[in-house]
Structures are given as structure tokens and as C-alpha cells.
């Protein structure tokens, strides 16, 4: 995930003074009011305190071995988690309202982090693989069913999702990661503490350079070419020769 996550809603807590409810249509403005732009949000499970401490110990071991962990890569406040869904929406409160029912009893759900893994990219992110138990997969299916036709990210949809807890994002040497975590006992039998919806930071748009204008003569499709002046042969003085 990105470098900072701003919490939007605690999803396994009762709705208190927030707008929206499951099934409500998205709010609309008056005539001529532009639709708000869609931002990116993540639906995450945080662990209990004991499990979070275990993962942070693994992060610290990576940092000691020169591998930037998630703790050092991301801003303060980034926590170990499992991501259930990612979505783009201009109405996060509507999404949060839909998710409160399937996530209302998530606290206490047992999960197990069983092995070290890497995603296959140039700089392979390292993670702790989470066992896809029946209860976890059912929860994941219910979350996406609640989101319905919202714009969710394909990697996190049922059938594509690989449950994991991120350890590091830019791993140049997988062997170093394995050595750093050699003393981390696996599996880690964890417990889910809470469910939250968090906002990802907006990514800056790339600056587009304006094309250079080329001035040309009227009606022409290419630059005018100045005529080349012929060179004159140097005048020789009578009776003198050039050295060879």
C-alpha cells in the first residue's frame, strides 16, 4: 500500500452519526454540480496487540539486515494488516455503511501466517502468507458481495485474492530477507482485532510537457532553409605555392 493511510471508518463498530446506510443511492448535487472525483480506499483487518508486536519484530529484523521494512518505508501509523478489498469511490461513507454488516463480528477471527513469500516483480515485495481458511474466504466473499458493483481492484476480488501481510516492498535480495527472518518462528497464530476502511493518498498526476512550436513560413510544412552561399577559392599570390 501507499505511504500513508488515513482512517475513514471503523467497520466493526456501530454506526454513530454518519450518513448513509446499506442500499442508499449515492448523494447527488443540484443541476450543474460536478460529481466528486473517486479516491482509492482499502478495507483492512488489523491484528490483536500480541500479533502486531510479532510482525513489528519481523520488520525490525529486516531493518537490521539492511532491508527497508514496511515500518521504515511507510509513514508513522502504518500497521500490520490483511487487505480484503481495494476500491475507487467518491462516496466512501456509502461503502462503509455496506460493509458494517459483514464485518460486524470480525473481532476474534483466528488467522495463521504460515510462510514467507514474494510477489514476482523486479523488486519483489516480501510478505507473510496467510492461510486461506474457510472462515476467511467466506468473510472475503461477503465483503465483495456487499460492495456489489462498486469499482474494486481486480487483484483483491474473489478468485484472484492472495491473503498476506506485507513485510517489505522493494526487496533486491530474497536471501537477505530469509536470513533476517530466520529466527522468526512460523506459523504465527494470529487473531483479528478490528476492521477498518482507510484512504490511500492521492497520487500526483504526471506533468505533461507542452509540445514545442516550430515557426515556419506561411503555407509551408517545414522549416525554411536558408540558401547556402558558395565558398570562394582563396586568392593565391603570384609566385607562391602551397606546401604539400
Image (cartoon, rainbow, N blue to C red):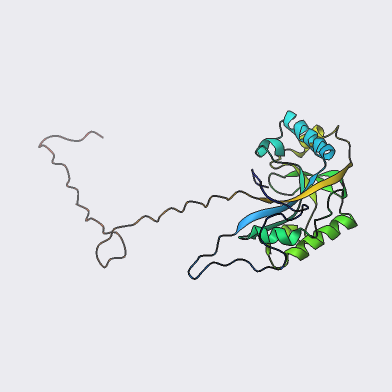
Check the image and report above or below for 200 versus 29. Answer: above
In screen coordinates, is 118 left or right of 237? right
Q: Which of the 4 image quarters holds residue 21?
A: bottom right
Please name whichever residue, 17 or 236, is drawn nearer the observer in this view of the structure: 17
**Percent from the top left, x then y, of residue 197?**
71, 52
Check the image and report above or below for 154 versus 122. Answer: below
Kindly give the residue lying farthest to the top in the view shown.
64
Q: Residue at x 76, y 39 (%)?
A: 174
**Percent from the top left, x then y, of residue 159?**
80, 62
Kindly give the residue lying farthest to the bottom in the view shown.
31
Please name whichever residue, 28 or 170, is drawn nearer the observer in this view of the structure: 28
Q: Can residue 159 be seen in the rendering of this structure?
A: no
**Percent from the top left, x then y, of residue 157?**
75, 61
Kindly give the residue lying farthest to the left in the view shown.
238
**Percent from the top left, x then y, of residue 32?**
48, 69
Q: Which of the 4 image quarters holds residue 239?
A: top left
Q: Can residue 145 be seen in the rendering of this structure?
A: yes
Question: Which quadrant: the C terminus?
Answer: top left
Q: Which of the 4 image quarters holds residue 185?
A: top right
Please name whichever residue, 104 or 74, is drawn nearer the observer in this view of the structure: 104
Q: Residue at x 69, y 60 (%)?
A: 95
Q: Residue at x 57, y 50 (%)?
A: 203
In screen coordinates, is 231 left or right of 33? left
In screen coordinates, is 20 left or right of 209? right
Amino acid at each position: 500500500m501507499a505511504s500513508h493511510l488515513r482512517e475513514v471508518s471503523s467497520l466493526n463498530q456501530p454506526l454513530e452519526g454518519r450518513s448513509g446506510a446499506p442500499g442508499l443511492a449515492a448523494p447527488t448535487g443540484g443541476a450543474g454540480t460536478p460529481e466528486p472525483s473517486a479516491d482509492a480506499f482499502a478495507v483492512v483487518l488489523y491484528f490483536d496487540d500480541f500479533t502486531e508486536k510479532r510482525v513489528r519484530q519481523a520488520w525490525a529484523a529486516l531493518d537490521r539486515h539492511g532491508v527497508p521494512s514496511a515500518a521504515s518505508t511507510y509513514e508513522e501509523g502504518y500497521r500490520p494488516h490483511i487487505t480484503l478489498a481495494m476500491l475507487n469511490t467518491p462516496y466512501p461513507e456509502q461503502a462503509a455503511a455496506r460493509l458494517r454488516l459483514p464485518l460486524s463480528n470480525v473481532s476474534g477471527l483466528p488467522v495463521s501466517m504460515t510462510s514467507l513469500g514474494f510477489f514476482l516483480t523486479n523488486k519483489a515485495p516480501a510478505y507473510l502468507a496467510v492461510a486461506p481458511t474457510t472462515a476467511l474466504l467466506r468473510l472475503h466473499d461477503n465483503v465483495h458481495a456487499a460492495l456489489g458493483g462498486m469499482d474494486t481492484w481486480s487483484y483483491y476480488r474473489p478468485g484472484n485474492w492472495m491473503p498476506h501481510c506485507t513485510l517489505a516492498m522493494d526487496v533486491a535480495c530474497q536471501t537477505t530477507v530469509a536470513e533476517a527472518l530466520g529466527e522468526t518462528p512460523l506459523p504465527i497464530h494470529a487473531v483479528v482485532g478490528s476492521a477498518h476502511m482507510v484512504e490511500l493518498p492521492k497520487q500526483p498526476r504526471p506533468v505533461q510537457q507542452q509540445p514545442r512550436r516550430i515557426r515556419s513560413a506561411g503555407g509551408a510544412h517545414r522549416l525554411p532553409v536558408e540558401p547556402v552561399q558558395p565558398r570562394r577559392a582563396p586568392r593565391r599570390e603570384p609566385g607562391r605555392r602551397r606546401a604539400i
